[in-house]
Amino acid sequence: MAIRNEIWIINTVGCINKSAELLAKLATKELTTADEVDEIRSFPHPFGCSQLGDDLKYTQQFLSSLVQHPNAAGVLVMGLGCENNTIQSFQSMVGEVKDKKVMFFSAQEVDDELEEGLQCISELVEYANTFQKEDIPISELKIGLKCGGSDGFSGITGNPLVGRFSDRLIEMGGTAIMTEVPEMFGAETLLMNRAESEDVFHKTVHLVNDFKDYFIRHNQVVYENPSPGNKEGGITTLEEKSLGCVQKGGSAPIVDVLSYASRAERNGLNLLQGPGNDLVSVSNLAASGAHIVLFTTGRGTPYGGPVPTVKISTNTTLARKKKRWIDFNAGQIVEGANIEGVAEELLEYIIKLASGEVQTQNEKYEFKEIAIFKDGVIL
């Protein structure tokens, strides 16, 4: 199930970022009208060349999951031809795809990559235009949960609000996905106690301990959080930040634990391996299949991922100051609004957003980027 009908250009290597960007611009100008696909978009990144081992695996896993994302009705995978992330090896990571959704080519193997790309995208647009809007139950929705630029209100307004929303969505049969493992440190037992089975419990323990080992392997302090911006916003300790962060997951049982950029398969609350970095986290959630990401913030950020990214302000001052960034104001809760009523308001907004009746600020202003988690060896 998709909530957008877009064409994505996924390049296997950063060397052709500009070629992919130019191709997206040309295709938008020459191949679309108001009645056709929602958007043709490329996603620049610096990786794919000279990566080895897990470093290459992370890149391939992430990009292959993006290729499979339902919001991308058609995908052009564009390679250069000499990178470690070869078209052939990447195709095996992508696996089977439906119908005519994905096309592949390497720029070094064709006379003119722009002409070749335009021809491919023309066929993808034709394929995307075969889809029609239809009513879908809310149980089909997958929502990513994220916080960033947190402040002293994050654990009082924004994160508890998203937790209420998450519980409502899951009660309706939907899926919520929560990441930012370092921001679970200090509150991890609250999550472990909600595992629906012994197997999920052990996966949750491993998720947290593995990320602590990651810090230790790189000789970094496990409890370095909160960030300078968090401290300025009123958060004093990692435990305080983590106790606020995990509230986004509401109170539902945890049904699965996912490796980095793996696609969520089970309805309910999923935990996703990944760091707290805003760009990497939102991208990771999108790769896991989230149709929309809810992003609570007390300090504010213009960042948006490849899917609609709903910026929820924890305070009204930020919502008024940054109207081009913020989509929803949770600050009204400390001003007397009932949190259950605000959660219902947020649910109604998300339904309109998923239905295409409204757009997020990151969609309106084309703030759509990706960032890939890097951990390993590069030549």
Image (tube, grey):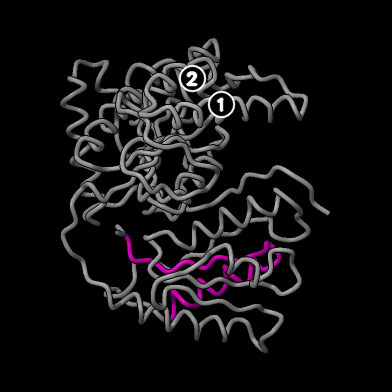
Q: Nearer the viewer, residue 58 or 278?
A: 58
Q: Secondary structure at mark 2?
A: helix
Return the x and y of residue 309 as percentages of the image width and height.
39, 45
Overall secondary structure of the magenta stretch?
helix
Task: Report whether 261 appears left or right of 141.
Answer: right
Classify 83 as above or below 338. below
**Residue drawn at point x = 50 percent, y = 48 percent:** 262
Q: CA distance from mark 1 to mark 2?
A: 7 Å
Within the magenta stretch, is there residue 15? yes
Task: Report whether 318 appears left or right of 45.
Answer: left
Which residue range is magenta in the image?
4-30
Within the magenta stretch, is there residue 251? no
What numbered label is drawn on residue 208? 1
Task: Report whether 250 appears left or right of 104.
Answer: left
Residue named by callout 2: 188
**Residue drawn at point x = 37 percent, y = 35 percent:** 255
Return the x and y of residue 80 as percentages of the image width and height.
69, 73
Q: Secondary structure at mark 1?
A: helix
- Answer with mark 1 or mark 2, whichever residue precedes in sequence: 2
Verify CB contact (< 8 Å) between mark 1 and mark 2.
yes
